[in-house]
Image (spheres, grey):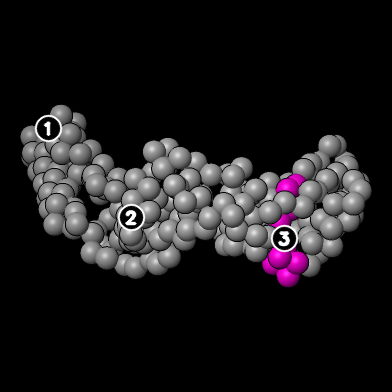
């Protein structure tokens, strides 16, 4: 029978090896740089880069065709006749029409076997006003980007922040691979874990040899 001390050493060592004590295994981390692009509330209908927001889609031809129809009258179709890219309109609240220099507010839904779409033309500032959050409510790297590019090893979706001059779109502007600051302690932890597993295996072997010797 394996002793409690040997069993504990094996369990601890294997736990460290299979579930790193500090995030991912040793190696390079991804660092995200966030930048802010301001635009005032008095902007016209120009399409800004708001389609980077999770709630805003960038319209492709098949989507724009049906959305423009829905801007005049409700579009209703059987679900099995709706292309996948049009069905994805149910996942966003706004759609950017880059060629038409226009945004649309969407109400796309599927009820049973029926796809229904309503659309209303809106300005870029209307989209910003609807989706904007106060800087205090945004994650620190997103908020800090208002004062200059901010970096973080955490990935955040794009966001619109309210500012004294109107709004600012904050999004990832660059990514790079950087050294993991926890590389040394991670390697030390892995070394300790390997030592525990080796010691545990040797202990199991020695205990087995002792039992067989006693039987002789």
- Asked if the magenta segment contains residue 171, the reply would be no
- Which numbered mark, 1 or 2, is in the foreground of this view? 2
Chain-order first, disc 2 or disc 3: 3
The N terminus lies in which quarter of the figure?
top left
- Which residue bears the numbered disc 2? 147
**Local crowd at mark 2 within 10 Å, few (<14), some, or many (≥20)?**
few
Q: Which mark is residue 5?
A: 1
Give the structural element (helix, strand or loop) at label 2. Answer: helix
The residue depicted at 23 percent of the width and 64 percent of the height is: 179
Q: Earlier in the sequence, mark 1 or mark 2?
A: 1
x, y percent for residue 70: 86, 51
Query: Is residue 98 within the magenta segment?
Result: yes
Spatial CA distance of label 3 from label 1 is 69 Å
Magenta-tinted stretch: 97-106
* x, y percent for residue 97: 72, 63
Residue 216 shows up from this direction: no
Q: Secondary structure at mark 3?
A: strand
Mark 1 touches mark 2? (CB < 8 Å): no
Please say if 215 is above or below 152. Answer: above
Q: Quadrant of residue 4?
A: top left
Q: Earlier in the sequence, mark 3 or mark 1?
A: 1
Q: Is residue 65 left or right of residue 158?
A: right
Q: Is residue 30 above or below residue 141?
A: below
Q: Position of residue 131 (x, y in %)?
A: 58, 44
Provide the residue designation for mark 3. Answer: 102
Which quadrant does the C terminus fall into?
A: top left
Question: Would residue 210 be visible to someone looking at this image?
Answer: yes
Foreground pick, 177 / 206 = 177
Q: 27 left or right of 52?
A: left
């Amino acid at each position: 029978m394996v002793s409690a001390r040997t069993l504990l050493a094996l369990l601890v060592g294997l736990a460290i090896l299979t579930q790193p004590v500090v995030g991912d295994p040793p190696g390079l981390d991804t660092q995200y740089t966030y930048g802010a692009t301001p635009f005032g509330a008095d902007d016209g209908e120009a399409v800004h880069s708001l389609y980077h927001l999770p709630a805003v889609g960038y319209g492709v031809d098949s989507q724009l065709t049906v959305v423009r129809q829905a801007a005049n009258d409700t579009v209703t179709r059987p679900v099995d006749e709706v292309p996948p890219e049009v069905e994805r309109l149910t996942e966003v609240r706004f759609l950017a029409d880059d060629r038409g220099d226009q945004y649309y507010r969407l109400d796309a839904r599927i009820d049973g076997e029926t796809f229904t779409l309503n659309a209303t033309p809106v300005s870029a500032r209307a989209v910003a006003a609807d989706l904007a959050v106060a800087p205090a409510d945004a994650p620190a790297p997103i908020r800090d980007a208002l004062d200059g590019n901010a970096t973080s090893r955490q990935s955040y979706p794009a966001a619109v922040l309210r500012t004294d001059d109107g709004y600012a779109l904050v999004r990832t502007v660059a990514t790079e691979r950087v050294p993991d600051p926890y590389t040394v302690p991670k390697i030390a932890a892995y070394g300790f874990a390997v030592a525990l597993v080796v010691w545990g295996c040797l202990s199991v072997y020695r205990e087995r040899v002792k039992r067989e010797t006693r039987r002789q």
